[in-house]
Image (cartoon, rainbow, N blue to C red):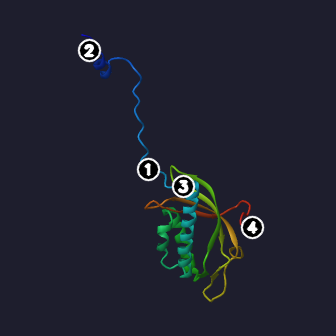
Amino acid sequence: MLPLAGVLVGVVLLSGCVPGDPVVTPQPEPSSTPLFASEEEALAAATEAYAAYLAMSDTITSEGGARPERIKPFVSEEQYERELIGFEAYGDQGNHSEGSSQVDSPKLQAYDAATSRVSIYICLDLSGTRVVGPTGETVSPPEASGRLPIEASFVNGSEATIVVDGSEPWSGSDFCAL
């Protein structure tokens, strides 16, 4: 009789008829993992993405703004629209660039692992470039002859990469002059 009573108590407990701890529903795992394992990895990826973006931008401007759609894989949709305006101005004015831009001194401003948004400060070195007008004269503005402090932002692109979403001159103290 005792073994039968033990089985009945076990069945009752297993059937939930006896009050117990509240049922805890496990939270679903996040559907995606962060794009980068660390802030250092995010900074390295952003620096690499910016350098690739600059290389293509230099190529397009060296050809007078021709075929600007080549910048599309390197930028967000919003940035692409802004880029088209700049490249169109090159073509309309008959300008082209010579030389190549360089970047250095990258520093992470922010990294949001949940959205993979990255913002960095970077020095854009234009000392090896110049803008040439239609008759061969240099038309580079004076501020475009050295190192400029830039704040660049990045968002998720395709294929687990990030792309440039913004690139603006930094209005704070010139960290490139240090």
Above-or-below relation of 123 to 9: below
Pointer 3 residue: 117
Per the model, the C-alpha gap separating discs 4 and 1 is 40 Å
Q: Nearer the viewer, residue 174 or 20?
A: 20
Q: Earlier in the sequence, mark 4 or mark 1?
A: 1
In the rendered view, tell whether residue 30 sits above or below residue 9.
below
Amino acid type of the residue tagged 2 in the rendering? Pro
Q: CA distance from mark 2 to mark 1?
A: 50 Å
The quarter holding residue 167 reads bottom right
- Mark 1 closeness class: few <14, some 14–19, many ≥20 residues within 10 Å: few
Which residue in the structure is indicated by mark 4? 177
Residue 44: image x %, image y %?
57, 62
Secondary structure of the residue carrying tag 2 is helix
Q: Circles 3 and 2: CB distance less than 8 Å?
A: no
SS class, disc 1: loop
Residue furthest right in the image: 178
Q: Which residue is mark 1?
A: 32
- Nearer to me, 57 or 88: 57
Name the residue located 63 percent from the left edge and 88 percent from the top edge. Answer: 136
Name the kind of residue labelled 3 in the image.
Answer: Arg
* Mark 3 → mark 2, Cα distance in angstroms: 63 Å
Would you name the residue on which mark 2 appears? 3
